[in-house]
Image: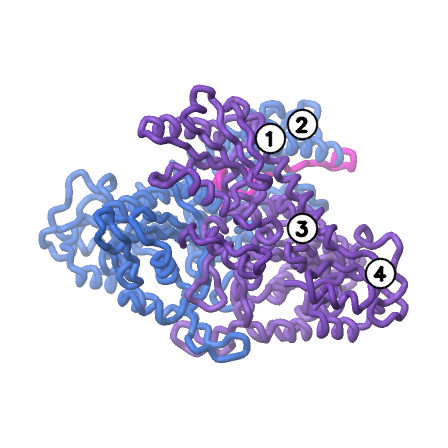
Chain colours: A purple, B blue
Amino acid sequence: MSDDKKLPTRAENFSDWYNELVLRSELADYSPVRGCMVIRPHGYGVWERMQRALDDMFKATGHVNAYFPLFIPESFLSKEAEHVEGFAPECAVVTHGGGKLLEERLVVRPTSETIIYSMFAKWVQSYRDLPLLYNQWANVVRWEMRTRLFLRTMEFLWQEGHTAHVTHDEAEHETRKMLGVYRTFMEAYMAMPVITGLKTDSEKFAGALRTYSCEAMMQDNKALQAGTSHNLGQNFAKAFDLKFQTEQGTEAFAWNTSWGVSTRMVGGLVMTHGDDAGLRLTPKLTPIQVVIVPIYKTDDERAATIEAAKRISDELGSFTRPDHERIRVHVDERVGIKPGAKYYHWELRGIPLRLEIGPRDLAAASGMLVRRDTREKRPIAWDALRAELPIVLQQIQDDMLAAARARMEAHTIRERISYDRFKEIMAGDGAFVYAGWNGDPAVEARVKEETKATIRCIPDAEFRSQVAPTTCMVTGEPAKFEVLWARSY
Amino acid sequence: MSDDKKLPTRAENFSDWYNELVLRSELADYSPVRGCMVIRPHGYGVWERMQRALDDMFKATGHVNAYFPLFIPESFLSKEAEHVEGFAPECAVVTHGGGKLLEERLVVRPTSETIIYSMFAKWVQSYRDLPLLYNQWANVVRWEMRTRLFLRTMEFLWQEGHTAHVTHDEAEHETRKMLGVYRTFMEAYMAMPVITGLKTDSEKFAGALRTYSCEAMMQDNKALQAGTSHNLGQNFAKAFDLKFQTEQGTEAFAWNTSWGVSTRMVGGLVMTHGDDAGLRLTPKLTPIQVVIVPIYKTDDERAATIEAAKRISDELGSFTRPDHERIRVHVDERVGIKPGAKYYHWELRGIPLRLEIGPRDLAAASGMLVRRDTREKRPIAWDALRAELPIVLQQIQDDMLAAARARMEAHTIRERISYDRFKEIMAGDGAFVYAGWNGDPAVEARVKEETKATIRCIPDAEFRSQVAPTTCMVTGEPAKFEVLWARSY
């Protein structure tokens, strides 16, 4: 795809902007299989860094990785009644294998509760075998009618945590802990602030007791559910006979949790930070942190600037200096492409810093450093790079989070508004609206029908208003909960 | 599964020994889906370390990771004639999705040449876009009738490299380079010596010009094909119209390579090094390098030995000393289990080193260090651990490779033997037999029929005999090649 064509702006059409940007920045591409995408190296590089950071956090909280089969016997899915109702319509089904019709159809996993808890049941005998704290990195398939790159694809990559505990409270603690891990990751790595809270019954995971989620605001003021953590209660333990002998010698069913985040987060990163010139990747997740663009007219100048660029790149990227963080640097040596076109190329791809080195910079041993997020420019001496770049990168990371947080706050409505006003807002620019709700699912359904907005969550205490709403925004009846309304992906 | 039951010995029944060991060491387990296995945390921990090491080597040789869809339209598979003939009988087929019969059936990828080269065709216009050096970590499915944990399972995890080049020679160079990467990995990390060489036409990959492989000898003297690297020529480029404009302005088809290794390597590690007491994992791949077993009678002794063990573990496992390699240490704090049972537990799981710390060791600030591979014991002072453990671990790594190499050499026959003698050997203990071959596939087929042995490869020069065989072992006709015969997995 050519870099020349101009990207649609966010204001013109946010959805077109997103689709075009994902394609043109080479994060992903459409595939010959309807609804499945190809994750290209630039997008996969972001995902790899997400994986590494999360995996380290999972291990630091005592979890181990394992791998369970892609295929699930169709009968397994049916063992938990709500679960099968939720997932069966979305399943891809294998009916033939090795040239023969199968006796039992196999479902391509849409999620792995059933197969994993059937194995846990085999491994767990006593309370001494608990807790089991497992995680799996895997692909899953959910048959979707309307797909969008990263946000909703038939196949996606994710991690799914699955744990088993002796008590309800321990499972609840785990559910909340992992939600906290997700929030930390999203804020510290993605620079994407989130609201955490409890899902209403109509939005919870099929088979869960309680579902918690992280909700982030995209630049079109719609919410993206970026991660979920479920307290599954004993529903799956009962379905799969996951029992253990208690310390008192009695028998009890285990308590389970599951929690997951997926490649959808890459879409969240794009829609949180991208601008009309392209992606803006965070320093912690970008495959390349600094791109060096040599500027030259003659062959001699080319040789000299590239030689300097490579020397700097080797020094910054070296593993041999344990006293400094290693920086991911790329030198753009492509021939026959003007510096301006190179700037455009790397801006589109969201690289946080550009260092320009021209012939006159050689004698001064300096270059021009340009930030992608603010477009701020300043000269910098080569021998200051080692010390200053980590500081600048952290500054960019912090500034991006602050900017995203300010944007979310600016489009959050906390004052009590009428349902008519709410309808206007949802029909217009949209917003995160905090409001009272009487707890009636029929009200939830009506609002969704009338405005396309849904209750994203019953926010955790720290996000709730200082003065709780007393009445339901829709019915005027007494409010049972303060909830967060928004249109969503 | 209880640790108490005795493992079958290798001499009694190598196959039973392998199956039982994989289960009882908790590397893997059978799953409810026929032919699919569950990789348990201990096995997945080994696989993760294999992945990390290989991934680093792929990146150091200029490759990038990407991800392509799990599903392949059935029509794609048919575009390369030999490829479909080889893979179609092994395919799992999705016929239903979202509750509906699909218009085109989808094959669950058995390998990804077809889908990847169809995308390459979309991305490549000019010679400037080449080479493309891609790798994918993924699950694949091949419908197998007789499965064995790790060695042959319906679904397995692997990496598949896929590259596109301007010339045949460049593709051939890449094919050989990645075979070399595999060999380096297998010898340096798995301590598993391999013979590299060219596959005969009857054994090459369906759709390839040439297939090279790494062949390792297991303890039953059978060969394990542990990795393959294919020069695909222009076969797939022609099938998927993967063309580019050359520097001269003409149009040409690209040259492709593909190469892969899988979770099968975990089985190779077990069968190369395991003994009658259990696994022997290499220091580079084991999840735990040193297990500390505290020995005590009283509660006070328990507290004191565990406290010492944890202090040592923290110090050795710390990231804060950049001047020393971090060591993976586990303290076995389980209560109600005798030291002897703990030794047995960790020997079964193949942990390279055990450090015993008893009450009398506390005053002396020392412990007893026991090697899993040689069972050698020696006292060691705590303050010597930091400096000595990396040396001991490297020594174990080197000794394991040397032992495996010596065993392979001891069961390799290089002198010229008669076909009758060959038949006796293959009916008995088996061996790697180097012999002349007239190049006739009919001879290959006859030997396989009569002895179950196959030509593992036409070995690379460094493995061939100093004096090349002049006659075919089977027919007595002039030999075209020296080949390596063995029974195999």
Say which amino acid is labelled 3: Tyr
Q: Residues within 10 Å of mark 1 (few under 14, many from 20)?
A: some
* Pointer 3 and pointer 2 on the same chain: no
Quadrant for the N terminus of chain A, please: bottom left
In the picture of the structure, the residue carrying the numbered disc 3 is A182
How far is disc 1 from disc 2 in space, using C-alphas?
9 Å
- Is A33 left, or right, of A391 in this rendering? left
Q: Residues within 10 Å of mark 4 (few under 14, many from 20)?
A: some
Quadrant for the C terminus of chain A, please: bottom right
Where residue A416 is drawn, which disc sits there?
Answer: 4
* Pointer 1 and pointer 3 on the same chain: no
Disc 3 or disc 4, which is closer to the eye? Answer: 4
Check the image and report above or below for A186 versus B296.
below
Check the image and report above or below for A383 versus A313.
above
Secondary structure under the numbered disc 1 in the rendered image = strand
In the picture of the structure, the residue carrying the numbered disc 2 is B361
Secondary structure under the numbered disc 3 in the rendered image = helix
Label 2 lies in what chain?
B
- As rendered, which of A82 and A343 lies closer to the eye? A343
Secondary structure under the numbered disc 2 in the rendered image = helix
Label 4 lies in what chain?
A
Residue B224 visible within the image: no
Q: Main secondary structure of the magenta part?
A: loop
How far is disc 1 from disc 3 in space, using C-alphas?
43 Å
Residue at (79% x, 52% y) in the render: A463
- As rendered, which of B457 and A389 lies closer to the eye? A389
Counting from the top left corner in percent of width and height, residue B190 is at: 43, 42
Say which amino acid is labelled 4: Arg
How far is disc 3 from disc 2 in space, using C-alphas?
44 Å
Residue at (46% x, 52% y) in the render: A26
Label 3 lies in what chain?
A
- Which segment is the magenta one? B277-302
